[in-house]
């Protein structure tokens, strides 16, 4: 139990420091809405390695994810009654933040269970999540700033989708190389296919559900590729 409490303590310290810093920056510097949204997005992504590596047993990390979501959801629901809350966290729709956190931490729990609990491959858990997380942040920022070429029948742009592909590729390739155990061309081939799946999934997933479809799509594709190439 000590390990569980210690790991959970690390996550609480992380949340308190990063969230308070972000909100202070928002108050003092008036960061534009979209960059601030992605800053919060990156803070949530940054805690994932603690859930993967900060607990002695993998299921402690899963339990911590579940408890965090269960505790924070009603707290955020309470604060939604105040107008300042929605302004500070830049919600597009009422309840967006609490619902997003619930989905993200549920996704974290599943990825940890599969990659760490069943396969004992923590690096693959990181690759699955960051193929989506960092790629999605890049897609939003690049797409809004430079997205002048719209994809037919979509509000998204070629520039944003390419940013998603490029960052997903970089994340997966870096993690697979650090993991080792494969031929050099296997890293590249796997990374390109995972990045392609991630970019297309993000492009065609409606209603913000890419928080689920992209990490699961990346994880499934990567595991299949590694199995076929002898990497697992």
Image (cartoon, rainbow, N blue to C red):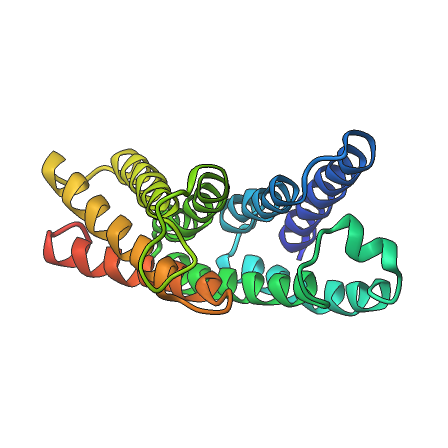
Work out whether residue 136 can be spotted. Answer: yes
Indicate the position of residue 120 as horizontal and vertical percent values.
35, 55
Task: Name which residue lies at 31% across and 45% down.
Answer: 165
Along the horizontal axis of the image, is 99 left or right of 152?
right
Total numbered labels placed on residues in the image: 0
Q: In the figure, 92 relative to 180: above or below?
A: below
* Residue in view at x 45 percent, y 49 percent: 136
Taking the image as shown, residue 105 lies to the left or right of residue 8, namely left
- Residue at figure coordinates x 74%, y 51% from the top left: 89
Q: Residue 138: image x %, image y %?
A: 45, 41
Q: Quadrant of the C terminus?
A: bottom left
Q: Name the spot of residue 222 as percent of width and height, x first.
A: 25, 55
Q: Nearer the viewer, residue 47 or 160?
A: 160
Q: Quadrant of residue 61?
A: bottom right
Q: Nearer the viewer, residue 178 or 192?
A: 192
Residue 158 percent location from the top left of the image: 32, 47
In the image: residue 7, left or right of residue 78: left
Residue located farthest toward the top when viewing the structure as drawn: 29
Q: Is residue 118 visible?
A: no
Nearer to me, 161 or 61:
161
């Amino acid at each position: 139990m000590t390990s569980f409490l210690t790991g959970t303590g690390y996550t609480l310290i992380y949340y308190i420091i990063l969230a308070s810093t972000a909100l202070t920056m928002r108050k003092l510097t008036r960061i534009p809405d979209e960059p601030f949204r992605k800053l919060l997005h990156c803070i949530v992504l940054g805690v994932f390695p603690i859930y993967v590596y900060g607990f002695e047993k993998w299921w402690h990390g899963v339990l911590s994810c579940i408890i965090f979501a269960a505790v924070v959801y009603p707290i955020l629901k309470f604060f939604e009654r105040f107008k300042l809350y929605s302004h500070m966290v830049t919600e597009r729709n009422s309840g967006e933040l609490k619902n997003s956190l619930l989905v993200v931490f549920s996704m974290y729990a599943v990825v940890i269970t599969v990659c760490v609990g069943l396969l004992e491959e923590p690096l693959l858990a990181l690759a699955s999540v960051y193929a989506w997380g960092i790629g999605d942040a890049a897609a939003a920022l690049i797409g809004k700033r430079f997205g002048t070429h719209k994809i037919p029948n979509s509000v998204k742009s070629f520039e944003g989708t390419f940013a998603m592909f490029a960052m997903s590729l970089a994340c997966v390739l870096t993690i697979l190389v650090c993991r080792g155990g494969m031929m050099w061309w296997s890293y590249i081939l796997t990374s390109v296919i995972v990045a392609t799946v991630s970019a297309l999934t993000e492009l065609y997933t409606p209603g913000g559900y890419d928080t689920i479809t992209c990490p699961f799509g990346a994880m499934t594709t990567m595991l299949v590729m590694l199995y076929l190439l002898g990497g697992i």
